[in-house]
Image (spheres, rainbow, N blue to C red):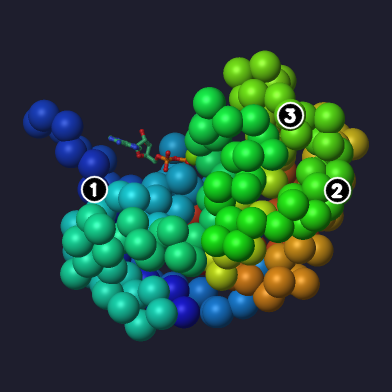
């Protein structure tokens, strides 16, 4: 359902350039749980940005549901993201003028208050429902951002370091909930992590090295 064929990605700034991916080919199945690991700067966030169409690649082909995404215009890309993707990124993108409950509400095509309450409870942030993002701790913001992504019940769920700001106990709670949720909703989950234990809980562990990815 997500198929990358010979994708190359280069960042250019002035006279210098950096090749992040070269001839990267990989196929993600329609449902399944994949983790992505690799050193800092190896291209993990870039990979998620390419898959979601937030960043452009230089060469190759990237198909989502059989559709070549480089042929889509900005409006079509936004629609694709709105309809199929849920994200929680390293730098959370919560709407500052809404409390956490409403942040979740606006992410849902068919808002379901009970579903939101359940997800907040499972992530141990029920107490944050009426709070605004700027008043939360880093870990609470991170879990709120995950809650918003899950509430949407997306077909494709992309999580960049979802437990990076959490202590061990909360990290385990959040990891298990995310994996359970992805299994039950049968979505495609791709998550980036520096935590080997967490990475190994995925069906498929992908490692970025030498500007490519390989099954670990
Ligand atoms: N917008 C950009 N312009 C230029 N270079 C960039 C840009 N975004 C990322 N890079 C470079 O591309 C490389 C891959 O970056 P990326 O953010 O994907 O790494 P990462 O694996 O997610 O790292 P981390 O684990 O630290 O989050 C890095 O060397 C980074 O400096
Ligand atoms: Mg990153």
202, 78: nearer the viewer:
78
Name the spot of residue 56 as percent of width and height, x first.
25, 54
- Quadrant of the rendering where the C terminus is positioned: bottom right
Please identify, in this view, whether the residue under mark 1 or under mark 3 is nearer the observer: 3
Q: Is residue 23 above or below residue 107?
A: below
How busy is the neighbourhood of tag 2: few (under 14 within 10 Å), some, or many (20 plus)?
some
When asked about the image quadrant of residue 52, the answer is bottom left
Residue at 85% from the left image edge and 48% from the top image edge: 122
Q: Residue tagged by mark 1?
A: 10
Please identify, in this view, whether the residue under mark 1 or under mark 2 is nearer the observer: 2
Mark 1 or 2, nearer chain start: 1
Extreme residue toward the bottom, this view: 66
Name the spot of residue 24 as percent of width and height, x first.
36, 66
Q: Is residue 166 above or below residue 31?
A: above
Residue at 44% from the left image edge and 37% from the top image edge: 41
Q: Secondary structure at mark 3?
A: loop
Q: Is residue 208 above or below residue 182?
A: above
Q: Secondary structure at mark 1?
A: strand
* 128 sits left or right of 67 in the view: right
Q: Secondary structure at mark 2?
A: helix
Residue at 51% from the left image edge and 74% from the top image edge: 28
Can residue 185 be spotted in the picture?
A: yes
Q: Is residue 67 above or below residue 140?
A: below
101, 138: nearer the viewer:
101
Name the spot of residue 62 as percent of width and height, x first.
32, 70
Contact check, label 3 and label 2, Cβ < 8 Å: no
Q: CA distance from mark 1 to mark 2?
A: 40 Å
Q: CA distance from mark 3 to mark 2?
A: 16 Å
How busy is the neighbourhood of tag 1: few (under 14 within 10 Å), some, or many (20 plus)?
some
Please identify, in this view, whether the residue under mark 3 or under mark 2 is nearer the observer: 3
Disc 3, ligand 2: is the CB inside 8 Å? Answer: no
């Amino acid at each position: 359902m997500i198929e990358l064929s010979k994708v190359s990605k280069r960042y250019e700034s002035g006279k210098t350039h950096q090749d992040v991916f070269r001839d990267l080919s990989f196929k993600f199945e329609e449902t399944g749980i994949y983790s992505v690991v690799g050193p800092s700067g190896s291209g993990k966030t870039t990979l998620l940005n390419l898959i979601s169409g937030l960043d452009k690649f230089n060469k190759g082909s990237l198909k989502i549901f059989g559709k070549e995404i480089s042929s889509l215009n900005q409006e079509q890309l936004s629609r694709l993201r709105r309809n199929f993707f849920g994200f929680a990124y390293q730098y959370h993108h919560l709407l500052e003028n809404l409390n956490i409950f409403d942040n979740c509400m606006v992410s849902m095509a068919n808002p379901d208050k009970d579903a939101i309450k359940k997800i907040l409870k499972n992530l141990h942030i029920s107490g944050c429902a009426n709070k605004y993002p700027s008043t939360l701790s880093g870990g609470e913001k991170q879990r709120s951002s995950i809650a918003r992504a899950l509430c949407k019940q997306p077909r494709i769920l992309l999580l960049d370091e979802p437990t990076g700001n959490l202590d061990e106990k909360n990290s385990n709670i959040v990891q298990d909930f995310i994996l359970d949720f992805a299994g039950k909703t049968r979505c495609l989950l791709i998550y980036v992590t520096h935590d080997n234990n967490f990475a190994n809980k995925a069906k498929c562990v992908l490692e970025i090295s030498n500007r490519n990815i390989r099954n670990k």
